[in-house]
Amino acid sequence: MAKQSDTELRKASVHLLYEEHMLCETAKLIASSTTNPVEKYVRLESFLLHARNLIVFLGWHKANHPEDMKATHYVPKWTPTSLIPIWAEDLYTSVSNAALHLSYARSGRDPLQTEWKVREIVEAIQKELNRFLDLVPKHLLDPRFQSAAETVFSQNDANYLTGRTGPTRP
């Protein structure tokens, strides 16, 4: 794919903002109580999908499609932190096999029954996004990026403090 213009990058950055926003909002929804198993799955699948997209953008996993947005499009010398979270590869593979594709890999482990550490995932991604936002030339970002990252978690949220999720699949 050809190098993106500044205008293309600025327009595309809205999608990055969307991914970060949805990651945070679905994390909040996971923490809120629901007894409806479909709602639990929708929340968790959405969270994992947005986390996966940001893992690729940040470079913790290789982008498989030439059209994929990458942090290196904005900051050519970008490299993710040397400490790639342990969960990043597992999350990417699990979501790819069980939520994005109808595959035989689903018959193995069910990522929706995994106890994902939602808080740890969001904090690691936001830390890396903040690093990215410190390095990216501001003219390449949509003006809505004025604040680096929103605070998602309250100190008193027991679900985040335990880090436990994972509805039981019927």
Image (tube, rainbow, N blue to C red):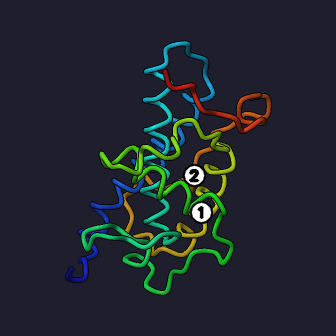
Q: Quadrant of residue 150?
A: top right
The residue positioned 49% from the left and 68% from the top of the image is 58
Residue 167 image position (x, y, % from top left): 57, 27
As displayed, is residue 113 above or below residue 136?
above
| 7 displayed left or right of 57 | left
The residue positioned 77% from the left and 36% from the top of the image is 161
Q: Residues within 10 Å of mark 1 (few under 14, many from 20)?
A: some
Which residue of the protein is positioned furthest toward the bottom in this rendering?
Answer: 77
User: What residue is disc 2 on?
Assistant: 149
Residue 85 image position (x, y, % from top left): 65, 64
The residue positioned 71% from the left and 29% from the top of the image is 159
As displayed, is residue 124 above or below residue 102?
below
Could you tell me the amino acid type at mark 1?
A: Asn
Quarter of the image with the N terminus in it: bottom left
Q: How many marks?
A: 2
Which residue of the protein is positioned furthest toward the top in this rendering?
Answer: 35
Residue 108 image position (x, y, % from top left): 49, 47
In the image, which disc is placed on residue 152?
Answer: none
- Of the residues under marks 2 and 1, which one precedes in the sequence? 1
Q: Are dots 2 and 1 in contact, CB under 8 Å?
A: yes
The residue positioned 46% from the left and 29% from the top of the image is 41
- Which secondary structure, mark 2? loop
| 154 displayed left or right of 110 | right
User: What residue is disc 1 on?
Assistant: 130
As displayed, is residue 119 above or below residue 96?
above
Q: Quadrant of residue 98?
A: top left
Could you tell me the amino acid type at mark 2?
A: Ala
- Which secondary structure, mark 1? helix
Q: Nearer the viewer, residue 113 or 33?
A: 113
